[in-house]
Amino acid sequence: MPPVTATDTPTPAHAPPAATGRRGNPWLTLIAVAFGLFMVGLDGSVVSIANPEIGRDLGATTAELQWVTNSYLLALAAALILGGKLGDRFGRRRYYLIGVAGFTVASVAIGLAGSVEGVIAFRAAQGFFGALLMPNTLGMLRAVFPPHRFGMAVGIWAMVSSVSTALGPIVGGLLVEHVNWESVFYINAPVGVIALIVSALVLPESRNSTGRHRFDVAGVLLLAAGLLVLVFGVVKGETWGWTAGSTIGTIGAGLLILVLFGWYETRQEHPLLPMRLFRSPALTIGAIITAINFFTLLGSIFYIMLYLQNVRGYSPVWAGVITLPLSIASVVASPIGAALTDRYGPRLTMPLGMVLQGGASFGLMFLGPQSGYWAMWPSFVGLGLGIGMVMAASSEAIVGNAPVKDAGVAGGLQATMLQIGGALGTSVLISLISSRVGATLVPSLTAAGVPQPLAGGLAEARDAVAMGVAPVTADLPDQVRAAIIDGSATAFLNGVHTAALVAGMLCLAGAVVAVAGIRRGTPAHR
């Protein structure tokens, strides 16, 4: 295999090594970055299982537990493009290793913190180091893989990401049940050490040589501020209310700052995020589809887990096992999606994945309080197939259509859209469920046989019901207790059906955008 070029105009000091021997081998590079990617993906979904135990052990309030999740999300979203740019400019291997080391140390520090304030602070540190790590995984793959093999590499990358996210609830459930919540974070230590050792041995350095120029500090500050304000508005929208002035004002301010950032970047010789990247329709639409993909994935997983654990009564471990078809399907779909994108371009695979996810979401509208597994698994398989296919296609559309010199920035853009989509998915869909529960709880309770006065009094418990929890106490008569459980489950599922409908319609809209916006015959690489 000939040497792989890591920059558009490499200098002798920055030219990548030939892909021969151990260092610079594309497949060894893929194995090395998979360890770091797996660690971040696993941690992103495992925390939802640990949160209740963290709250009980540390005496945390609901608001503090929200910040255990949100501090990580905000730090990650604000720094992803910065992490990619630092890697492109100063060395992707260097910043990947810094990210892995920092993420590992922050994980151990969370378990040792001893207070919810410490957990929140180190979760933010985890997010920052994750932002250094994630975009440079794709950046290094783009630098070492030749174009005709990059699609398969992205497929495997997407598979690792999907599997680690899907395994989170299972691993987290086992550790929380049989060890303690701290072990959920300690497990990153051995994975991180292995990642550091393997990466140090096999990863080549690659960067973009642009000569001496000022780093875009103002662009960093504007982008971080815009993303922080935007994501903060999104995650607080459920609490404040989506039509509240504080929500609209915060999200509007974040968007305004991002528009200002885009205007500023067009006037810089060496911008943090080159606006010229968006001249590629495939790249632009790939970023949009990535957001819709994770809007559907994380939002759906959130309410599916509530349904399985709080309505059906499964343990966290069994809930994770039941959703295994989703992760298995994503494993199968990722390399298939990459191969199809290589052959036919993203105009086929992105809409196909969106349609699969949309159909799966519509299928979840038929869930009932006592639905059997036969009613669940087709939607789980459909979600997994769609997610894996879209993940591979959109990753290749974004990073594969960016110049090699901007590979890290393109990876950061994809990861940023992923995080924003996931934040919107959990916030918007849970808000829809809460709204629908509030409107239907009392009628659902009375229809189930709960006396009208008692049903009216239970209207105040709509927040608990929106999480799938029936507001029952031990002193209630068995017949009334059963009626409350049945009526609460019906109200919760009314909300789930509304959320599934919205997610399904959004996926179909994404499919239309992909078909209409990407030209026929668009190449996967340039």
Image (cartoon, grey):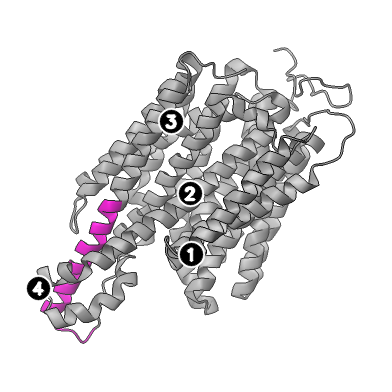
- Is residue 316 found inside the magenta-colored segment of the image? no
Q: Nearer the viewer, mark 4 or mark 3?
A: 4
> Which residue is drawn at the image coordinates 58% and 38% (left, top)?
414
Q: Which residue is mark 2?
A: 422
Q: Which residue is mark 4?
A: 449
Give the Cα separation between the discs numbered 3 and 2. Answer: 17 Å
Q: Which residue is mark 3?
A: 389
Q: Which residue is mark 1?
A: 245
> Which residue is drawn at the image coordinates 36% and 50% (left, top)?
321
Secondary structure under tag 3 reads helix
Mark 4 vs 1, N-terminal side? 1
Secondary structure under tag 2 reads helix
Left or right: 512 as drawn, with respect to 186: left
Give the Cα separation between the discs numbered 1 and 3. Answer: 38 Å
| Dot 2 amino acid type | Gly
Check whether the beta carbons of the residues at disc 1 and disc 3 lie within 8 A of each other: no
| Dot 1 amino acid type | Gly
Neighbour class for label 4 at 10 Å: few (<14), some, many (≥20)?
some
Secondary structure under tag 1 reads helix
Neighbour class for label 3 at 10 Å: few (<14), some, many (≥20)?
many
Give the Cα separation between the discs numbered 4 and 3. Answer: 46 Å
Neighbour class for label 1 at 10 Å: few (<14), some, many (≥20)?
few
Q: Nearer the viewer, residue 449 or 392?
A: 449
Check whether the beta carbons of the residues at disc 4 and disc 1 lie within 8 A of each other: no
The magenta span reads 474-498
- Is residue 480 found inside the magenta-colored segment of the image? yes
